[in-house]
Amino acid sequence: MRVVNAEQVREMDRRAIQEFGIPSASLMENAGAAIAQHIGERYGSTAGRKVVVCCGGGNNGGDGWVAARWLHNMGAEVTVCSPFLPERLRGDVLVFADVYIQMGLPHRLGLAPTEWDAELRQAEIIVDALLGTGLQGTPRYDVQAAIDAINRCSVPVICADIPSGVCTNTGSVETEAVHATSTVTFAAPKLAHFLPPGSDYVGSLAISHIGFDWNRMEMDTKCRLNGLTSNGMFQFWPATASPLLRRRGQQTNKGSYGHLFILAGSRGMAGAAAMAARAAQRSGVGLVTVLTPVSCQPAIAVKLDEQMTIGLPENGDGVVSLDALPIILKHVDRATTVAMGPGLTRAAAPLIEAMLHHLTCSIVLDADALNCLAEMDPEVLRKPGRTAVLTPHPTEAARLLQCTTQEVQADRVGAIRSIASKYQAIVLLKGAYTLIANPEGAVTINGTGNAGMATGGAGDVLTGITGALLCRSAALRHIQKEILCQPEDVVALSALVHGLAGDLAANHIGQTSLIAGDIIAHLHSAFNQLEATC
């Protein structure tokens, strides 16, 4: 499902009207009806319930006027409130405001900033239709007063398209925005629904196509949504990754699913290697071998049953040393993918750099491997025919870009595109709504996962899943003699599976008590759920 910015929203509207002949008033009518329908579905009968619809002066306000009329027809006691007088309205907005007013329905227009609290005091449900996708900068003072008054109420708030006060393209909030219980967006989700801090204001997200098949409109937005929404409205995963979700062939063996080597661990950091290995095995790879300092091997081996371990030379601090390179190269000749980084520490930089020069198979870099990479020439990562995947969290991303974590979070889409271009790699930027980008700048937003996954080891689990799925994809390509799964789609699938397993774990035990091992324990359920719909 495509994700759009403000300019693309305007272009989609223009094309729907001019190329496909959809009257603009029809789109507004359907948008307002969708808001009312959402309220009815979510809160049951609206008969007798007091609803205040807060309308701005633009098209978003027009959606609100329509929603108010529909809610009245559903039996609600509706009042439209607006800081604007009718003479400030234009076009379809004025048409629908006139219809509502001519019906003799309650409305309070031209409200002063000090009057909002009194108007909202009796509301049982509030509809925010003040500002839409065209907001630039700070809302005008009277609209901001309405936003602040809405936030002082303790009733459900349903936002039209996007919470008022949130910038569509960046998710930035200049002063304050409406805190929504749910947001009903139209045609396609918007970037700000998934970018902080705006994503924190959205609540649950519902998507309405408002009476038009927008897929008929070819438009490369270079951004798509991948996952399951909280309201279960759609399911999507990269089409080219679907072979990894098909039933296994009867004549296959462990060699048919690849061999993942994981370079991980150091003294006191054995758990990271073990979690990555166990997550990889649960993700369907044929074989997993952990490469780790010799002093860590016993501790890791006792945590593992199905995975192999190889002890490597280390320095006096229990960190794998450059002397391990010949041993590693001897073993990874049979590797399908090599993942490195969890628990290594930055002291492993010489070995990591040497391996990047030698390895020809696909690679996954996480944790300290990324911190080491940040100190190297980006050219070290570029080897023809090799897939390289980087999985930074925001602070690691900042090191790769030599900027601050705040700058990364302020423009997550721009940041991930910069990293992917700089290193000519596939990048997975962790966080709420994990992003995946390829070097050409195409971005996938992952829609699974929850705040309970903000726990130590969750990233190591993701490393294992990603390495395993890359292995399976490469092994499948070797068998089929053709590229069936694009690498960026395989990485997007790994984020989807990781988040879905975390969601299933949270449903079972709650977010507070969720730990990384719970994500691994629910991987089988995540794969079962996806495979059943493939």
Image (cartoon, rainbow, N blue to C red):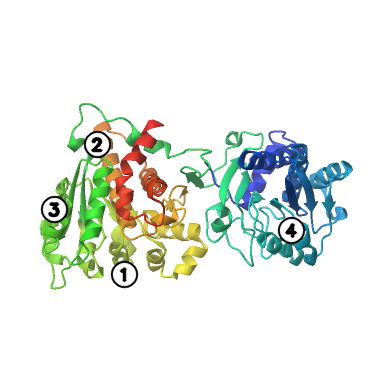
User: Which residue is rendered at x = 49% and y = 68% of the image?
Assistant: 407
Q: Quadrant of the C terminus?
A: top left
| Percent of width and height locating residue 354 | 20, 62
Label disc, if present, on residue 309 of the rendered structure:
3
Per the model, the C-alpha gap separating discs 2 and 3 is: 26 Å
Residue occupied by mark 2: 478
Foreground: disc 1 or disc 3: 3
User: Which residue is rendered at x = 23% and y = 51% of the image?
Assistant: 277
Q: Amino acid at mark 1?
A: Glu
**SS under mark 1:** loop
Q: Is residue 102 left or right of residue 265?
A: right
Frontmost residue, 513 versus 161: 513
Number of residues whose C-alpha sits closer than 10 Å to that of mark 1, classed few (under 14), some (14–19) or many (20 or more): few
Residue occupied by mark 4: 121
Q: Is residue 313 left or right of residue 512?
A: left
Residue occupied by mark 1: 375
Per the model, the C-alpha gap separating discs 4 and 1 is: 57 Å
Compare marks 2 and 3 and give the one earlier in the sequence: 3
Per the model, the C-alpha gap separating discs 4 and 3 is: 65 Å
Report which quarter residue 325 is drawn in: bottom left
Compare marks 4 and 3 and give the one earlier in the sequence: 4
Q: Amino acid at mark 2?
A: His
Per the model, the C-alpha gap separating discs 1 and 3 is: 29 Å
Number of residues whose C-alpha sits closer than 10 Å to that of mark 3, classed few (under 14), some (14–19) or many (20 or more): many
Q: Amino acid at mark 4?
A: Arg
Residue with the most extreme bottom position: 316
Compare marks 4 and 1 and give the one earlier in the sequence: 4
Foreground: disc 4 or disc 3: 4
User: Which residue is rendered at x = 22% and y = 41% of the image?
Assistant: 258
**SS under mark 3:** strand
| Percent of width and height locating residue 312 | 12, 61
Compare marks 2 and 1 and give the one earlier in the sequence: 1
